[in-house]
């Protein structure tokens, strides 16, 4: 049996579901860039639920920028894969069928541009990770030294990066008299729509100020907050899929039951009924983003480095140590003081729910996975909350503790998977006995100036380091 025959089989066990719509009638309407685990368990699942409720032309064209592997697997499985939801109640698998085409951009960039130019494409979503945007942390604009930005400025018709593809797609649409597509960022960045809008406009301005004016007038970049814990798949995931489905699914992933998507309802040419999957449409998404980035992702960063220091492989292992849970709770307490009220959210309940999600014994979320690219994650998860806490005259020890954990985990491992890894490792190689974190604070743009100048908070970082 293949995924294809499985998806139309009438003999599925109760804990396996298949798409309830006719896949053959599904037309492409969304291009998604970044075919990672997160997209497969989040936007694709919401889109399937939307189509099941209200059928429409919202098939997804899945684009991976560099690696051809997931694209090949999708091709072999005719766009089908399974999402295994794990909880104390047991495992269940949903076969997802909303993906209607698949492209590796590094191999067939022209086909990506053809889709982006088509009036049938009404929305472009993307999950490419923080480091892929070419965002200068100091200016908030384009980092002209970023490899993808450099390449796309030099060769705009054959883009390699996400901003380059968006701009080239918009150029073609304008030439053909089509409206722009709605640009919907699904990465963990604060005000993610505004961030991407600025990057797209800056690149467009370099190409043609008229193009930038057109995008300013016609373009839409709704902000969105995305949430679901989706660990990278392992050999065990694949084995679990075989026992649930009876089929070897190369793209199977496993995740938790919780999923959340808060979206600014600002689309140019319609959208799927994502609310069918529980998405919430809001006028202002920023309060939700801030809450999630600081409480969930900020705690994740704390847990990840704490875990690495204590040789704990998974988030759940850290959460099994009461002393470490107390550190997470202390952190959340300090973070909550930086948040405005979030409409419809009971923050004490949200916090409690997070502790339970982190502790989920069926989810194997590696601390090393979360520790990847920490330099790109600190600003929105830790540093902005630190600056606000200090400005309000409150205690910021927990934030100093997270920085100390990060520094200590780098020193422990001696290597680092991070776009600023070389500079950071150079800082880790020498320790000034009078100011142990000094060289980290000297790395340009890593910490905002108000924290570089916060002498007593930096002393706290050193004090935490000494304790570790
Ligand atoms: C994690 C996130 O890897 C990480 O940095 O903090 O991927 C996290 O699991 C998701 O944002 C949850 O929605």
Image (tube, rainbow, N blue to C red):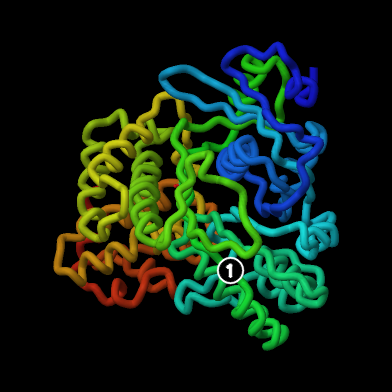
Q: Residue at x 24, y 73 (%)?
A: 454
Q: Residue 403 at what x, y percent from top left? A: 32, 57
Q: Residue at x 69, y 53 (%)?
A: 30
Q: Is residue 182 left or right of residue 109?
A: left
Q: Is residue 396 visible?
A: yes
- 134 w.r.t. 362: above or below: below
Please state which of residues 214 and 203 is positioned toward the viewer in this rendering: 214
Q: Is residue 409 left or right of residue 130?
A: left
Residue farthest to the bottom? Answer: 209
Q: Is residue 40 visible?
A: no
Q: Residue 329 at what x, y percent from top left? A: 23, 43
Q: Residue at x 76, y 70 (%)?
A: 178
Q: Residue 432 at what x, y percent from top left? A: 31, 66
Please state which of residues 340 and 232 is positioned toward the viewer in this rendering: 340
| Numbered disc 1: secondary structure | loop
The number of discs equals 1
- The residue where tag 1 is placed is 220
């Amino acid at each position: 049996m293949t995924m294809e025959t499985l998806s139309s089989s009438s003999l599925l066990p109760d804990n396996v579901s298949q798409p309830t719509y006719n896949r053959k009638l599904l037309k492409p309407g969304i291009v998604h860039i970044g075919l990672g685990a997160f997209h497969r368990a989040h936007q694709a699942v919401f889109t399937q639920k939307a189509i099941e409720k209200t059928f429409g032309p919202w098939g997804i064209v899945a684009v991976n920028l560099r690696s051809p592997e997931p694209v090949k697997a999708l091709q072999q499985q005719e766009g089908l894969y399974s999402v295994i939801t794990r909880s104390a109640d047991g495992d269940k698998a949903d076969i997802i069928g909303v993906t209607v085409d698949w492209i590796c951009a590094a191999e067939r960039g022209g086909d990506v541009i053809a889709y982006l130019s088509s009036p049938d494409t009404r929305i472009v979503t993307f999950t490419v990770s923080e480091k892929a945007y070419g965002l200068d942390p100091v200016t908030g604009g384009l980092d002209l030294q970023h490899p993808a930005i450099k390449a796309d400025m030099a060769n705009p018709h054959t883009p390699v990066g996400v901003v380059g593809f968006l701009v080239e797609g918009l150029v073609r649409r304008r030439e053909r008299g089509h409206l722009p597509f709605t640009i919907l960022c699904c990465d963990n960045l604060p005000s993610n729509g505004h961030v991407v809008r600025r990057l797209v406009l800056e690149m467009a301005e370099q190409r043609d100020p008229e193009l930038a004016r057109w995008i300013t007038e016609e373009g839409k970049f709704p902000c969105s907050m995305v949430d679901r814990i989706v660990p990278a798949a392992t050999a065990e995931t694949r084995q679990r899929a075989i026992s649930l489905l009876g089929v070897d699914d190369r793209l199977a992933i496993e995740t938790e039951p919780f999923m959340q998507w808060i979206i600014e309802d600002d689309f140019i040419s319609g959208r799927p009924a994502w609310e069918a999957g529980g998405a919430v449409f809001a006028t202002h998404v920023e309060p939700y983003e801030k809450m999630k980035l600081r409480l969930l992702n900020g705690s994740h960063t704390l847990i990840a480095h704490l875990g690495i220091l204590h040789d704990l492989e998974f988030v759940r292992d850290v959460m099994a140590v009461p002393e470490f849970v107390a550190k997470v709770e202390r952190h959340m307490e300090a973070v909550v003081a930086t948040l405005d009220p979030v409409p419809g959210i009971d923050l004490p309940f949200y916090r409690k729910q997070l502790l339970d999600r982190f502790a989920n014994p069926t989810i194997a979320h590696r601390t090393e996975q979360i520790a990847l690219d920490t330099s790109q994650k600190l600003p929105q998860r830790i540093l902005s909350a630190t600056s606000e806490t200090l400005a309000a005259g409150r205690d910021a020890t927990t934030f100093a503790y997270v920085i100390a954990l990060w520094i200590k985990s780098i020193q422990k491992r001696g290597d680092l998977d991070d776009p600023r890894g070389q500079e950071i490792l150079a800082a880790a190689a020498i320790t000034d006995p009078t100011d142990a974190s000094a060289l980290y604070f000297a790395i340009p743009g890593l910490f905002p100036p108000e924290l570089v100048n916060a002498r007593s908070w930096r002393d706290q970082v050193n004090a935490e380091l000494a304790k570790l």
